[in-house]
Amino acid sequence: MNNELYWRLGFFISILAIMMLFEGLKPARKSTVTAKHRWLGNFGLVLISSVIARLTVPIGLTALAIYNTEQGIGLFNFIQIPLWLTIPFSILLLDMLIYWQHRLFHQIPLLWSLHKVHHADSHIDASTGLRFHPLEIVLSILIKLVAVTALGAPAIAILIFEIALNGFALFNHANIRLAKKPEQVLRFVVITQQLHRIHHSQLSNETNSNYGFSVIWWDKLFRSYKACATEDDTRLQVGLSQYPANKKNASIKTLLLMPFK
């Protein structure tokens, strides 16, 4: 755990670079807003969110998990379960938590006002997977802190979960289109790019589906799975109609003020 930062940064940078390379070589869709303007807003928001999150919630999830283990706090520190079972159980339960957190951010108006910053992107690529308002990031961290404490999840499970969560977010937002057969096989287990683009549709009944960030199981279990959109993936209108594709709506200033308008 002493090398946590290197593990997380290593996987993050590697996956981001691979996804952006594939996007550059064979993009699935074209954006009407230049990459320079979109990326300035999206990556700028990431930096601002990271600073604000560090200042407001200085304790990390893995550090909290270590403390909980030392103090015997949480479900898995109270009941005797082998570590090889505790790790996958923790990861699965945290992933289900993220599914329900995401779903509630769509259904509760106050939370949607924050989450719409993510959905207002008029073009979907790997950078969209990082585009979240600082207040949503802080709230998400607080929710995970409570969940990690309640579960008593081991630190190694938290590290694996956080790496996987970030990696899948980059993967399923990537502006690529997998070949038909591999995509059809993958969607039995994970959220593919085409499935997640349905979630970013401008139609509300399509936006309110495919909430998972990694596996498809939760959407199928809780009946929010949608296999295809009204339009073909090549013609699917993504984003929010009230935020048309232009330079202004992609700016950092607009993204930061969006929840308050």
Image (cartoon, grey):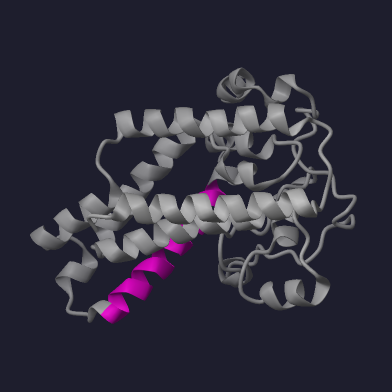
Magenta region includes residue 98 = yes
Q: Choose top left, top right, bottom left or bottom right for residue 152.
A: bottom left
* Residue at 80%, 46% in the rendered image: 203
72 to the left or right of 126: left
Residue 107 on the magenta span: no
The answer, for residue 206, to whether it is visible in the render is no
Q: Dividing the image into 4 quarters, which one contains the C terminus?
A: top right
Depth order, front residue of 145/41: 41
Image location (x, y in percent) of residue 240: 75, 35
Q: Note whether 216 is above or below 22 in the view shown.
A: below
Residue 168 lies left or right of residue 79; in this view the side is right
Residue in front for this viewpoint, 23 or 202: 23
Q: Position of residue 188 (x, y in %)?
A: 66, 76
Residue 43 rendering spot, x and y as whole percentages: 57, 33
Q: How many marks can you see?
A: 0
Q: Left or right: 86 with respect to 253? A: left
Q: Residue at x 68, y 52 (%)?
A: 21
Check the picture and name the quadrant holding the N terminus.
bottom left
Which stretch did the figure color magenta? 84-104
Q: Is the magenta stretch mostly helix, strand or loop?
A: helix
